[in-house]
Image (cartoon, grey):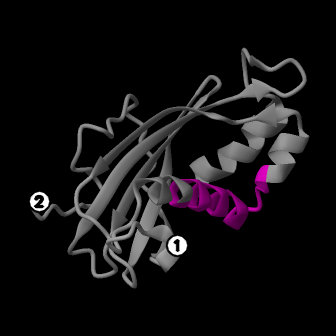
């Protein structure tokens, strides 16, 4: 694999494309350490582990802003993943550490897009880039909402302002 590097202003994969001109430049950094249970028998991170890290980083980012994900759910709004794109650039191995950066890229209607970059601590190695789209679903009816509830939108706006 080729060595690819990222900057704060551009992402190196077509898996992450911004559909809006208002891309939020602030990244939340979530450190990861590869433990044995994250890997396959060869000591290489299993692909599903990356998905877990994406969700952990997203939830921790919201928590750091005072938005508890459980509170959003308690407001009657589930936010399931409806689209996921991951590009694997280089493998992580057992014992390695890295930084997973995430940001909310877009908040359109009931769709919420998140971007991710997983790179080495020295920013010299790129491991993955990803994009996740969530959608607001009414918990009681199990249907996609026509618009975000005002209190959920207000909570998510904190991410935009950060």
Tell me if I can see residue 26 in this picture: no
Mark nearer the N terminus (2 vs 1) = 2
Q: Determine whether the residue tagged by mark 1 lies in a helix, strand or loop.
A: helix
How many neighbours does mark 2 have within 10 angstroms: few (below 14), some (14-19), or many (20 or more)? few
- Horizontally, residue 23 falls left or right of residue 111, namely left
Q: Which residue is at 27% across, 65% downward?
A: 91
Q: Which residue is mark 1?
A: 37
Is residue 58 shown in magenta? yes
* Nearest-to-viewer mark from 2 and 1: 1
Quadrant hosting residue 110: top right
Magenta residues?
53-69
Q: Which percent across, then down, holds residue 14?
A: 24, 37
Q: CA distance from mark 2 to mark 1?
A: 25 Å
Q: Which residue is mark 2?
A: 1
Q: Main secondary structure of the magenta part?
A: helix
Tell me if I can see residue 98 in this picture: yes
- Horizontally, residue 74 falls left or right of residue 36, namely right
Residues at badges 2 and 1 in contact (C-beta under 8 Å)?
Answer: no
Q: Which residue is at 40% across, 30% downward?
A: 20
Nearer to us in this view, 36 or 137: 36
Q: Which mark is residue 92?
A: none
Residue 121 position (above or below residue 137): below
Nearer to us in this view, 141 or 5: 141
How many neighbours does mark 1 have within 10 angstroms: few (below 14), some (14-19), or many (20 or more)? few
């Amino acid at each position: 694999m080729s060595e690819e590097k990222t900057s704060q202003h551009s992402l190196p994969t077509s898996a992450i494309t911004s559909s809006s001109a208002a891309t939020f430049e602030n990244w939340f950094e979530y450190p990861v350490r590869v433990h044995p249970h994250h890997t396959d028998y060869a000591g290489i991170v299993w692909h599903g582990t990356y998905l877990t890290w994406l969700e952990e980083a997203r939830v921790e980012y919201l928590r750091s802003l005072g938005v508890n994900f459980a509170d959003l759910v308690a407001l009657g709004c589930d936010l399931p993943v409806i689209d996921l794109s991951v590009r694997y650039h280089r493998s992580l191995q057992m014992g390695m550490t890295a930084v997973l950066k995430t940001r909310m890229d877009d908040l359109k209607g009931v769709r919420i897009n998140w971007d991710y970059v997983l790179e080495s601590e020295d920013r010299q190695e790129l491991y993955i880039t990803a994009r996740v789209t969530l959608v607001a679903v009414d918990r009681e009816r199990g249907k996609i909402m026509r618009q975000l509830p005002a209190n959920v939108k207000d909570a998510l706006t904190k991410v935009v302002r950060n």
